[in-house]
Image (cartoon, rainbow, N blue to C red):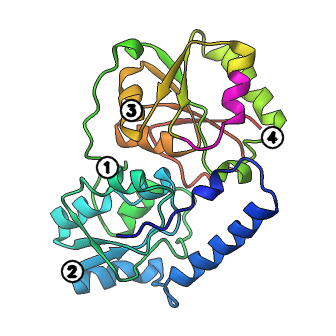
Amino acid sequence: MPIISENWKMRPKHNWYSKLLRKYYKIRVNLTKPRCPVADSAIREKAEKENQLVIQIPFGGLGDHLAYSSLPELLWEQKKIKTFISDKSFFRSRIIRDFVWKPNPYIEFTGTKGWFIYPPLNNSLLTIDEYLQNLFGLQGDGRPKVYYKPDTVQQLKGKTIVHPSFGPSGKANGYYETDFHRRFIDFLEKNAGNFILLLGRHRQAENPLEARIRHLLKPPCYSIESIEGLADALLSAERRYLMYSGGASLSAALGLESIVLCNRKAVPNFQYGLHKYIDLM
């Protein structure tokens, strides 16, 4: 199956070429979306009537896909609704597809277009996990779902870890701004104590915040080579300092409470109830 990729969005700065690719990406996104998407207010009735749900995730990050990951099992176990994942979904890399969806025994892939959150029902009190489960009338634990069973990393067992990772949304959330970097590092100095810095070696672009932490605080480091490796690290640590990104979603899926450092630009609804979110701005 061809994977529609958005690797180009990982560039920390946009020159004329990456801006052109960004425009091309937006056109492709619009072409793959259904012309008349099913509204959230109607999707439950449609899925129950047809006994199936086709999900088409329009954004390619790990957190974007994990947001929908609890639905297939809950829909089948509680309502006998079969879930399909549309091939028109976007994936930042095939690794995300293989980690989130390939091991899931409650889904199949399909070439048809499908539903995505559109437009969200107005309810500022619900987080994303609560919102989706309530949308379909499901009883769940309010967390994403993964089928990978992590192993303990002895080097990280009982330690404090810091994972300053963010994807393309980092620009919109202000994570490239020097002032945010300063506040992030000040917070670590005052609160994190002795910590191990996780280095995202699986990424294509250098993380400027990660580089600044290494330069100023000089912590011991541990390299992450894959999403499975990140899951192992999250499970092994006693305390976790993460960012408003896929790592926080993965931590929630594993049932691990974490401290998530972000700023007020982050959307409150797209957070997870078991985490503590700290606004650094």
Q: Residues within 10 Å of mark 4 (few under 14, many from 20)?
A: few
Q: Residues within 10 Å of mark 2 (few under 14, many from 20)?
A: some
Note whether 98 is above or below 40 in the view shown: above
Q: Is residue 47 left or right of residue 275?
A: left
Dot 3 or dot 1: first in sequence order is: 1
Nearest to the eye among marks 3 and 1: give it. 3
The answer to whether residue 127 is visible is no
The circle drawn on residue 229 is 3
Location of residue 231 by image quarter: top left
The answer to whether residue 200 is visible is yes
Residue 208 location in percent, x, y?
72, 34
Nearest to the eye among marks 2 and 4: give it. 4
From the image, tell me which residue sits under label 4: 177
From the image, tell me which residue sits under label 1: 145
Residue 238 location in percent, x, y?
42, 18
Q: Residues within 10 Å of mark 3 (few under 14, many from 20)?
A: some
Dot 3 or dot 2: first in sequence order is: 2
- Magenta range: 203-213
